[in-house]
Amino acid sequence: MGFLTACSSEPESYTTDFLYENNDIRAKVLEECKANKQSDENCKNANDAEGKMKHDKLMERMLK
């Protein structure tokens, strides 16, 4: 009995909100973007999420 496995060359798609909430996946996507191993959409979303994270941390420090 043989098994068929679905292989896709396209990476999974992530939303900005998902990447904002998942630091480890965001970091992995950003690294893969540097190596040109992610979609343009994922790279944009990861960069947007990273920017939002940095902004939120800055605002948090300013409000203390």
Image (tube, rainbow, N blue to C red):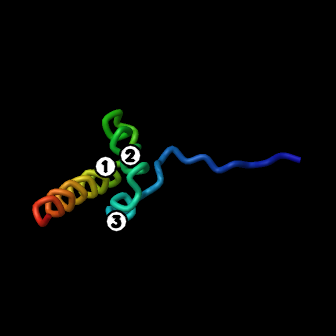
The label on residue 7 is none
Observer-nearest of 5 and 23? 23
Neighbour class for label 3 at 10 Å: few (<14), some, many (≥20)? few
Work out whether mark 3 precedes mark 2 in sequence or the reverse, and give the earlier one: 3
Furthest-left residue in this view: 62
Q: Secondary structure at mark 1?
A: helix
Within-10-Å neighbours for mark 2: few <14, some 14–19, many 20+: many
Q: Are marks 3 and 2 in contact (CB under 8 Å)?
A: no
Q: Could you say which is closer to the camera, residue 18 or residue 6?
A: 18
According to the picture, the residue beneath numbered tag 3 turns out to be 17
Q: Quadrant of residue 57?
A: bottom left
Q: Earlier in the sequence, mark 3 or mark 1?
A: 3
Q: Which residue is mark 1?
A: 43
- Left or right: 33, with 51 as reference point: right
Q: Are marks 2 and 1 in contact (CB under 8 Å)?
A: yes
Residue type indicated by callout 3: Asp
Q: Marks 2 and 1, Cα distance to the nearest angstrom?
A: 7 Å
